[in-house]
Image (cartoon, grey):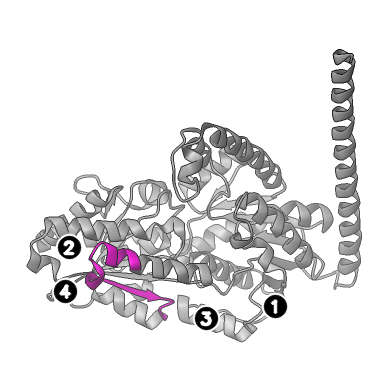
Amino acid sequence: MDWPDTIYQMVYTSVCTSLACTLVTGLVILLAFLLIRMMASRVKAGQKGSEVSVGFFHPYCNAGGGGERVLWCAVRAVQVRYPAARILVYTGDTDAAPDMILAKARDRFNMQIPDTNLEFVYLHKRRYVEAQYYPHFTMLGQSLGSLALGVEALLSFVPSIYIDTMGYSFTMPLFKYCGASLVGCYVHYPTISTDMLAQVQSRSSSYNNRRRVAQSPLASFLKLRYYKIFAWLYTKCGSASDCVMVNSSWTEEHIKTLWGKEVAKVFPPCDTSHLSHTVGDRDGDEVRILSLGQFRPEKDHPLQIKAMFELRQILAEEDWDRVKLVIVGGCRGQEDWKMVQDLKDLTKYLSVEDNVEFHPNLPFSDLLAEFSKSTIGIHTMWNEHFGIGIVEMMAAGLLTIAHRSGGPLMDIIVEDAGARNGFLAVTPQEYAAHIAYILNMGEETREGVRNRATASSDMFSTQQFERGWVRATDPLFAKFQ
């Protein structure tokens, strides 16, 4: 056997096969692009050509979280600024009628959204963006799934201006190049960040980097290659946007680094006017610690429960008995409800179940009552992109402890002497130490922190958001005037 010839034939066959697969894949993508663009053109031809339409892509518009507050404030800002514009919300909440969605926005956010020129485009392929269907390569799976959802949205209605308000950046080239729409986006959190790349490279385990991957050099190497390829795709999709808005200094840094584009920093709307009247009698025997955030892995609720365990070690028994952690959060589906049960099990394992309460999907009126009864606020997400809940707790007069990273560190909480408006921590021990310190603070010192916290929340008001949104998006509308 002539081994050199055999090896040559194997290499030649492999190269030819790879080239053939690449050409076939490229041809399929090109044909799909041309077909979608042709179908979108037909849809657009059947629409009124004279009106300006704005499509907000937000498949979970009825979720009731901070992202939904941004959506509805943005919708209202467009309604006021451009009353003749036709506004559409692409949503996958097929089980909720328009009046139900608007009623929930009113009840959850204390926000009236006029239904004038407002329509909902219901999408039936939302399952393609749900993480449960992608146990591996989740980011890529969800991003490719968003293309399927985006095609459904595009072929339902082609807007003059398309705005992604939920982070599905892969849909932006679709609307720009197949629908000829102007494209904008509001980025709450980059799908991939340089921090995530660094975490995999350093082989650190976290909610998005499993321990068994972090401990394996080969798995870490392959995952890093995957992340870099995904980051390249994410950058290409981001380049399709004509207007980029970000919600914090942390997100701004990452998007500038990844996309290489100028961005407008528009802090999310924190309607704190209703919170200035929630301060109740907090001088009773019970000390309530309020946690506010959706039940998702990245919020790191276990850290709060571990902090309670550590707190028990440093408090006298009579002081421990009067401390209660109250966890309020939104549940979107089965995975979120399972997380609540897991957290309850953790409280039992650490023997703090009598000092922890859970309130999933708490109505707005009951949430206000919790604000009025609480003394301390707690938030534990690492690299929280901003932290609307943190601002709300500070505005309500809660002595707030947040994670020393992301938006809380860069935009919200100040720890300088004489200017302190909150506290920052990382470990359960640090959180526990801050809680114990607050419990022993004098009333004059407490009031100083509260007053500074309440005053600093004004820079994140709904009015500031609306002004920033209009300023950033005006160039998009100018092209239709």
Question: From mark 3 to mark 1, how far is it between C-alphas?
Answer: 16 Å
Which residue carries the number 2 mark? 447
| Percent x, y of residue 191 | 58, 50
Q: Which mark is residue 286?
A: 4
Query: In the rendered image, which residue does mark 1 sit on?
Result: 119
Sequence-first tag of 1 and 4? 1
Q: Secondary structure at mark 2?
A: helix
Viewer-side label of 3, 2: 3
Who is closer to the viewer here, 150 or 81? 150
Residue placed furthest toward the front: 1
Q: CA distance from mark 2 to mark 4?
A: 19 Å
Closer to viewer: mark 2 or mark 1: 1
Quadrant location of the N terminus?
top right
Q: Is residue 429 left or right of residue 187?
A: left
Check disc 3: other Cα within 10 Å, few if <14, some if 14-19, many if 20+: many
The residue positioned 14% from the left and 61% from the top of the image is 439
Q: Earlier in the sequence, mark 3 or mark 4?
A: 3
From where the camera sits, is residue 298 visible? yes
Determine the CA span between mark 1 and mark 4: 47 Å
Q: Quadrant of residue 120?
A: bottom right
Q: Are marks 3 and 2 in contact (CB under 8 Å)?
A: no
Point out the tag, 3 or 1, that comes first from the N-terminus.
Answer: 3
Nearer-N-terminus badge (3/2): 3
CA separation in Å, label 3 and label 4:
31 Å
Q: Label 1 sits on what residue type? A: Glu
Secondary structure of residue under mark 3: helix
x%, y% of residue 405? 38, 46
Residue ID for mark 3: 104
Q: Nearer the viewer, mark 2 or mark 4?
A: 4
Q: Which residues are magenta?
A: 345-363
Question: Is residue 332 toward the left or the right of residue 29 in the image?
Answer: left
The crowding category of the residue bearing disc 2, from other C-alpha atoms within 10 Å (few below 14, some 14 to 19, many at least 20), is some
